[in-house]
Amino acid sequence: MGSSHPLSASPSVLVDAFDVALMDLDGVVYRGSEAVPHASRAIASARAHGMRVVFVTNNALRTPDEVARRLASFGVPAVPTDVITSAQAAARVLAARLPGGAAVLVLGGRGLRDAVNDVGLRPVATVEEQPAAVVQGFDPDIDYARLSEAALAIRAGAVWVASNADATVPTERGLMPGNGSLVAMLRTATGSEPIVVGKPERALHEESVRRSGARYPLVVGDRLDTDISSAVRSGTPSLLVLTGVVGPGDLLRAEPLYRPTYLSADLRGLFAGHPSVVVNGDGVPPQGVEVGGGPRSDDVSAVCGSWVAQVRDSTLTWRRAGPTTRAGGTRGTVDGVLSADGMPPDDGLDALRAACAAGWAAADRGAPVRALAGTRPPGCADLG
């Protein structure tokens, strides 16, 4: 239900179009130790509208119960079954490959050990216990001795599964080495490659769909390289929120694997219909759009709402479009207001949507944007 094509229109508000939101945590619900504005109220309203919200995380350190308690501290009530972790996906991959009761060397924290136990496998800590597999997840307490045990087991032929390959993990002090950095260390030491299960790989997405019972899932996240890429790889519609690490400039430069279906400033975008973006790359502007100087064969233009973006000679510019109707259905009532005609008011991102659509089309033709107009419309000030 709903296209997964980049920047698609949705005549219905997203809470009506999809039955389950597969929602990321850091950068979407909270940022470090602070709640993201509007997140808790939007999640409560989505649930009240009948959308199930489950929280999908690449972090294998915490158990689902611990994650649920952390969510509650940000004003988001949750139970363990609302949480799906990369540790659970890793354990399921192992269970499909190993006999019941097989020893698994756990290079990670409690979340990973509990997940291995839950699928009937036996967590161990040393190579002397003859592990059939090594499972690796983020744990700030990992030391050289534990890494060495894992390396010995992998070199002896143990199956190696990594919960995720994120090179960094966000903290209040800045980006610190993540699980992917330690995976790289073992890769160098052993010459082996792990089976990676976390986003953007399909295993965690499939585990999320299975556990949530989703028929029409919507991936909701703040990162292009994990959340949005996971959605693109699985053919699932996605909503990118601009409350985390991705800014407008990152979005403009996104390769096809990282382009979201829908775009919103924050989770209130679940309660909006999303506008159409019309692209024309043949030098002929979309209907209702007049381009100064006349069209040329190398022009790419896109229109969204009242904004048209054009790429000419690798330079991105904007101008107001002619009279248009902003397609996109009605808006819900969470922290927002209905426009007089029942259509959603411009959320301030239409110029950015048009710019990304034009920029992506130009890049796909081998002529990426290299310069931007000095005067930029709302939502585009930080594109440089």
Image (spheres, rainbow, N blue to C red):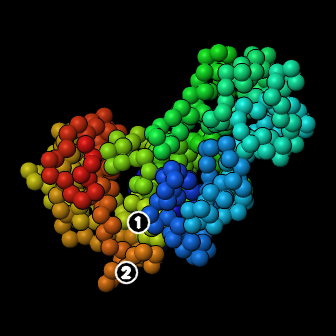
339 to the left or right of 97: left
Above or below, 154 relative to 321: above
The amino acid on which the numbered mark 2 sits, given as a three-letter code, is: Leu
- Residue that appears at 60% across and 72% down: 47
- Quarter residue 308 falls in: bottom left
Q: Is residue 2 above or below residue 92?
A: below
Q: For the residue marked with disc 1, what is the amino acid? A: His
Q: Is residue 66 left or right of residue 1?
A: right
Q: Position of residue 96 (x, y in %)?
A: 81, 39
Please tell me how crowded label 1 is: few (under 14), some (14-19), or many (20+) other residues with Cα within 10 Å: many
Please give left or right for residue 305 compared with residue 153 in the image: left
Image coordinates for residue 320, horizontal then vertical, percent: 18, 62
Q: Is residue 223 visible?
A: yes
Q: Secondary structure at mark 1?
A: loop
Q: Which residue is found at the position 68% from the left and 16% from the top?
A: 190
- Give the tally of numbered discs: 2
In the rendered image, the vertical position of residue 373 relative to residue 243, given as above or below: above
Residue holding disc 2 = 338
* Residue lying at the far left of the rendered structure: 293
Q: Which mark is residue 274?
A: 1
> Is 360 in front, or is 334?
334
